[in-house]
Image (cartoon, helix red, strand yellow):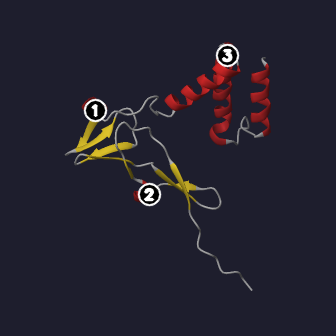
Amino acid sequence: MSNLEAHAKKEMEIAGLFDKDSDYGGMLADAVMKMIKVFGDEGHSGFSANMAINIFEKVARFEPLTPLKGTDDEWMEIGPDEFQNIRCSHVFKKNGAAYDIDGRIFREPNGVCYTSFESRVPVTFPYVPKREYVDVVSPQVPEHE
């Protein structure tokens, strides 16, 4: 077992991810260990490892590696004059105006994040998807006397 595999296994054991009562009954940890093994077998150095991780993360999240162009071949029609970008599923175009439905993410003080209709941001091309985190203030709960 490589140092990377040993580290990943130990960290996931500490986090309880192999436990049968964890999310997905420990299968997530098994899946991650498979990816760690493949990654370790590639023999990346520190620099190429970071590049590979960044590329993998983007494509695994269905994010584009280069800016969206907004050209006709990037869209799939989902309704009358309404389109979804085939390279980035959270970018839409309706009546000719493009927008990103995940452009603004709202974050509560406890760290919980959510999106809403107000998450939409207008898009101009070329466009690199980005997310702005907006910290929201929870209403004050009166203290009990």
Closer to the chain start, of discs 1 and 3, is: 3
Residue hosting label 1: 71
Residue hosting label 3: 44
Query: Which class describes the residues within 10 Å of circle 1: few (<14), some (14-19), or many (20+)?
Result: few
Closer to the chain start, of discs 1 and 2, is: 1
Query: Which class describes the residues within 10 Å of circle 2: few (<14), some (14-19), or many (20+)?
Result: few
Type of amino acid at the residue the image marks with label 3: His
Type of amino acid at the residue the image marks with label 1: Thr
Query: Which class describes the residues within 10 Å of circle 3: few (<14), some (14-19), or many (20+)?
Result: few
List x then y, in percent, for residue 51: 60, 24
**Location of residue 46 (image quadrant):** top right
Q: Which mark is residue 133?
A: none
**Location of residue 10 (image quadrant):** top right
Q: Is residue 6 left or right of residue 119?
A: right
Type of amino acid at the residue the image marks with label 2: Ser
Secondary element under disc 1, as helix, strand or loop, is loop
Viewer-closest of 21 and 17: 17
Q: Is residue 31 left or right of residue 100?
A: right
**Location of residue 143 (image quadrant):** bottom right
Residue 132 in the image: above or below residue 77: below
> Spatial distance from mark 1 to mark 2, Cα to Cα?
27 Å
Res 34 visible: no
Residue hosting label 2: 116
Residue at x 38%, y 32% (from the top left corner): 87
